[in-house]
Image (tube, grey):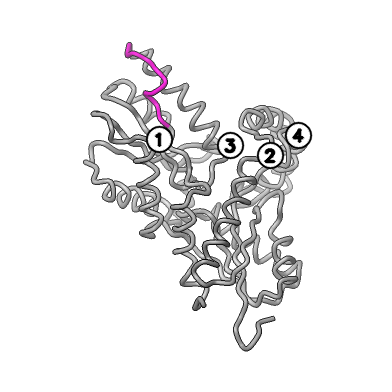
Amino acid sequence: MALHGREKVGVLLVNTGTPSAPEPKAVKRYLAQFLMDKHIAPMNRFIWWFILHLAILPKRSVASAEKYRKIWTPEGSPLLVTHKELAAALEARLESEGFDAPVRIAMNYGEPPIKKALREFRELECDRIVVLPLYPQTAHSTTFSVKEGVARAVRRTRFKGLTTVVEGYAEHPSYIRALAASIEHAGFGQQPGDRLVFSFHSIPLVDIEDGDTYELQTGSTSLHVADELGLDRKTWTISYHCRFDNARAWLSPFTKDTLARLAEVDDGRTFVVCPGFSVDCLETRFDVEIEFGELYRDNLRAAGHPVDGSRFVYVPCLNRSRAHVRALCDVLKPYLGEGD
């Protein structure tokens, strides 16, 4: 416990998750947990379990495993590897600013689980935990699902320390500056006609009707970044990708439709950035960078425009960049008390 009346605080970075291997069995195990979350698939649990295990997982786990193999690294899951690097860099940064705060990572689904991190914090004699879900824009299906996951883990591990969950940082100045710098670093604005697409994960419209402010947050982030870059409104747009199903209405316009429209005009290069993702994952590396890139080039050909590899530019996530570490440090400091 804390010495001399000073509490010890731990930091927990949480993200969605990743399979342990790019193989159907591991992917099936991960997807089974992910897709049973009521915030992801709000259906009757009993009926949905049978649909999921008999109709969806047998095919989807094989297809997803093939995608994962295309982005997997010798060190393992790129999402997990980057999170470990990010946590180490953040802990070092906090220490340099006078905060003795151990940083751990956890996934809401899959490994490592939240309960494992709580046990580690207990062994480190932490009095309080600050949980930072790595979702700058909050949503029922992300941040609030993590809050429930943390509450379950606290009950199951009987963790006695206090837990505080940071709920979003969509407008934080350090985050905005880091995003703007990453877009410039990717080459945006260096050629006439460059256009920027802010692509966010879509959510069901029913969530917005239930009070989810996600759409407002995505708009605010995009506007702040555009202002930081000094962009004319005609040079950037907001879109959404990755609908989970066709049974529900989803937040739009959809990125693939936006890219098709931009390909018809062909004024210049199109840059796509995904500000809602802190670390690159299957969705950004495969669905956006690879599939949307191919789709955009196909649309260019269909419109009779010249095609080359530089017409579509994916802006990587902030990952473990210095700017990202600095931004997360700035987001966390108000929750950590006084440094040394």
Could you tell me the amino acid type at mark 1?
Val
Which numbered disc, 4 or 1, marks the residue that appears first in the sequence? 4
Residue in the picture at 75% in, 72% down: 158
Residue 141 belongs to magenta span: no
Check disc 4 and report the residue beneath it: 54
Residue interval drawn in magenta: 304-313
Check disc 1 and report the residue beneath it: 272
How far separated are the C-alphas under marks 2 and 4?
A: 33 Å
Which numbered disc, 2 or 4, marks the residue that appears first in the sequence? 4
How far separated are the C-alphas under marks 1 and 3?
A: 16 Å
Residue 282 is tagged as: 3
Residue 75 is tagged as: 2
How far separated are the C-alphas under marks 3 and 2?
A: 16 Å
Could you tell me the amino acid type at mark 3?
Leu
Foreground of the two, 54 or 82:
82
How far separated are the C-alphas under marks 4 and 1?
A: 36 Å
